[in-house]
Image: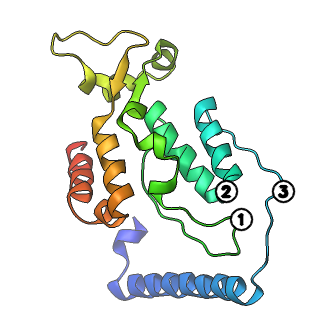
Amino acid sequence: MYFFNMKITELKMIIGGLIILALSISIALGIDTILIHRKTENIHGAVSSSSPLCSSHGRSILKDGGSAVDAAISVALCIGVVNAHSSGIGGLISGDRSLVGEPLLLSEIRQETLRPKAFNTKISIQEIRYTPQLGNIYSSNISNTCCVRKEGEKVKLTELATTLSIIASEGIKPFYEGEIADNIISAVYQSF
């Protein structure tokens, strides 16, 4: 309850201190990156995830000269498709030449994952047994005959496919401003 009883000036001082701390850390990291400019080299790499298919995508990114961050983004996007309950889109990381590889555009990260056929994922009874919340996630995929999909039947994630295609073609701005951002905000408000 102390937090709610604080005076506005105390709150401003705390927020100001946190901003100064964040700026100091950012400047220190920037100086380290720009002045020291360490050269790194990718000799060996491994990628691990809950999906062998997604791990394979991440490994391919590393082999193609991408950075570990590029591989992580590829794996996260892939998991968002094959295990929608485990991952979603969001966040931004960008680096410079001191990273292993170069940051890739979403449009360059495993182009085949952005094709509509890649957004058909099979329902696994084992996953639903261990994650009952999947019922809510997949409830929008009940067919017109009001029957729940069968195990192994494909589910089309058309909204995710559309969102990733927009980001790949137009960049990240539509994710933070515009229709995609408005849809995310609306979904969050509707969940309360």
Confirm or deny contact between disc 1 and disc 2 (CB under 8 A). Answer: yes
The image shows residue 165 at horizontal and vertical percentages of 34, 50
Q: Label 2, secondary structure: give it.
A: helix
| Image-quadrant location for residue 88 | top left
The numbered mark at residue 192 is none
The image shows residue 69 at horizontal and vertical percentages of 61, 58
Question: Against 33, is 161 above or below?
Answer: above
Q: Nearer the viewer, residue 57 or 6?
A: 57
Q: Label 3, secondary structure: give it.
A: loop
| Image-quadrant location for residue 27 | bottom right
The color scheme shown is rainbow
Which residue is the site of mark 3? 43
Which residue is the site of mark 1? 100
Question: Against 110, is 6 above or below?
Answer: below
Looking at the rendering, in which quadrant would you find the C terminus? top left
Q: Earlier in the sequence, mark 3 or mark 1?
A: 3
